[in-house]
Image: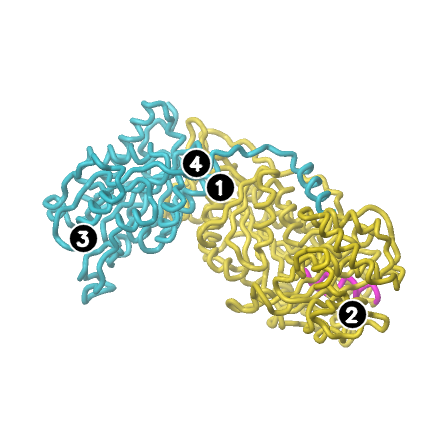
Amino acid sequence: MSPNATLVSEAKNTWCPGCGNFAIQHAFRYVIEEFEKEGIPKEKFVLVSGIGCHAKIVDYFNLNSFYSLHGRTIPVATGIKMANPELKVVCFAGDGDLYAEGLDHLIHAAKRNIDITVICHNNRVYGLTTGQYTPTSPYGYQGRSTPDGIHEYPLNIIELLLGSGAGFVARAYTRNIPLLKRVIHEAITHPGFAHIDVLQICATFFNMTSVYDEQVYETSEANVSQFDMACRTGQQWNYSDPGPIPLGIFYKTIRPSLPEKREIKQTDRKKVIQEILSRYS
Amino acid sequence: MAEFSVLIGGKAGDGISQAGQVIGSVFSSLGYHVYQYVDYPSLIRGGHNFCIIRAAEYPVTAFRSGVDVIIAFDQQTADLHKGRLSDDGIIISDADRVKAPGLEIPLGQLINTHQGIPIMGNTAMISALIRYLGVPWERIEPVLKRKNPKKTEKNLEIARAAWDVLSPSRKLGIPGGSSRPFLSGNEWIGLGLLAGGLDAYVAYPMTPSSGILHFLASIADEAGIQVYHPESEIAVILMALGFSYAGRKAAVGTSGGGFCLMTEGLSLAGQAEIPIVIVVSQRTGPSTGLPTYTAQSDLMFIRYAGQGEFPRWIAAPGTPEEAIFLGAEAVRIAWKFQVPAFIITDKTFSEGLFTGSSDLPDLLPHRVSAPAFPYHRYEDMPDGISPLLAPPHPGEIVKVNSYTHDFKGITTEDPQITIAMVEKRKRKEKALKEYTDQPGSVKIAGDEKAPVCVIAWGSVRGQVAEIAKDNSFRFVSPLILEPFPIKTFMAALEGVDRIIVVEESAAGQIDKILKEHGIVPDEIILRYDGRPSTIEELETRIRRVL
């Protein structure tokens, strides 16, 4: 048995007990095993993480990985996918990581429809830096950097993604594992940019279990290709006020994606350079 | 006549730089070596643009204070530059727009008569210049044809009409021999990267580095490379690291401000040991500074950029041949040692145009050697260099990490592994230093035995090299600035008792590197107005302290 035979690495897991990350890890492992059964070998996958509690997930998998910088999963993943379109590139990012520090990359990735999958571990709080607010924390959230509470509404990330041109937009919840597995599988299969905003609790700094359990419901995906319906579904919850929280795939459409299907020639560099020089003589 | 200089000037949008290139190509086709200096403000229409094209029977990489001909498309050109005219020099101007003594070409009338468009006035002026110089029509026609691939016949018709306005007044010598390629410094650097085996170039536009992006994008399909322009310099370097991780040799290019944004990615490359080539073309700072003017004030920044300690390689070309060689070498070094490899240049070199040799050195891209299995990305090797492997590889995993990591690439906070990883990088640095500190890393010119030595790097070497010919001093310049090739450099200084440093900065950047190694310059000649010195300007300043 080769040392890579199991999907889980020998790295010691340091997530807090009860952390939502375990559910994402479990679901992703299941999806990889499914892809292996479908004939896609696991070495075709590259995981890219940012920095934060979520990011440790790449250490815990015996899979190719690029443990990158805070907010920078998307440009790294884009480079990898452009370099080798055969690879299945999956970003694991946090909400502070992806929606604050690296937000511009997210918007541009959706716009250019780069064929990667982004899984955002959205616990709506900075965990590793001890509980500060993030772009998806609710109005009035009190953290160590905002002891009086924040006077700003959160970003509705679903609206932002739809407005940026994302072709696959979904929301999942770590306590609905069957949905999470299905959505991850579909996102990776989708030809183009695919985003999953995964609601998870932070067991230490922002435990929303009872709120989420009460508010979430699975939306119908019957009109998944209709943009205006997707917008309406996305607007049902503003990441702040109480009310129903839809889960599932909100929008799915196919449009031209990167990398372009273009053959890159093998060239004799010396000949090419001499040809160019002769044109400039 | 050993050399000849032409100044051509007008408003931005007049196509001054392109017209200068055609004049340069004409001189090159006659067998001259050519250098073209390009001076323009940061705007799209209006302002004052000018180029100085200098042709000589020996390689030239600088320009003189004086010119033999001024071609004026506007009054400002004649007024600003008439003081540069040599005793027998002359102004050739657009009769409709300029009042100046000299030769007038009725551009508006020529274009109207032949139903051309205003930009064809450039072809007309070039034709008039060549006629004035007494060069036969047969010598210029093929160049004009080649440089005007669109509306060729109309351009030639107008050129011929302008030709007939003047009579030949000079007899420009024709050295003969075959025409040399005439390209910008940015293009020569781009060719160097290609020669080194580059697979991908990622960049965000920023003067004066954008020429590399434009050039490589224009030849991407032909050369078999990928060129991409993403949303920011932060994205640029991280995308390039993604390319590199996936086994494609990637380079990025920018100027100081863009490089500021790249520094977190640079440090990531240092920690994760991901090869990358970074071209930084300096302009006058700090901050936005003078966007279209030159400087040598980012050497220290590039040398120390990025948090933490990690090895890097920095080289500064000064000639087209060095741009090809060092561009290729940067790719080789980055992949051989898995370090960031820099080409540091500046506006003068990037956007200046140079004729260079079309004979290429034998350049073999670095071949990545096969690793042992099971694969560990950070395998502890005696020279500190762990074998590279690009995913996908059946049964193996490739893990890279911005955290301190173990030999497999998994995050660690263990002090012993931390030490092992620091020492691995230090061994790599030592190997890099030994590889770099060799003959060729430092150039010696001028009077090689003289006790007085001038030290300069980068584009300034073009001016100093010419001054060194007529003055008895030794000219020593490092091509590699990091790791500084101190053994080779000290050998070049053997017998020197007086050191003069020349640099386009206010603080003296190489001065600090020299002092680190116990070399204390006696004089330092600095310039910080964003303009390169003419040969005469710098010669006067050097002679004052010789």
- Which residue position holds label 3? A206
Q: Give the residue displayed 57% in from the left and 50% down from the top.
A: B213
Residue A228 point in image, percent of width and height: 24, 45
- Mark 1 or 3, closer to the camera: 1
Q: Mark 2 or mark 4, which is nearer to you?
A: 2
Identified at 22% across, 41% down, the residue is: A172
Q: Are marks 3 and 4 on the same chain?
A: no
Q: Are marks 4 and 1 in contact (CB under 8 Å)?
A: no
Chain letter tied to cyan: A
The answer to whether marks 2 and 4 mark residues whose Cβ atoms lie closer than 8 Å is: no
Question: Which sits earlier in the primary sequence, circle 2 or circle 4?
Answer: 2
Nearer-N-terminus badge (4/1): 1
Q: Which mark is residue B398?
A: 4
| Chain under numbered label 2 | B
Which image quadrant for residue B493?
A: bottom right
Residue B515: % across, % down: 63, 67
- The type of residue carrying mark 4 is Val
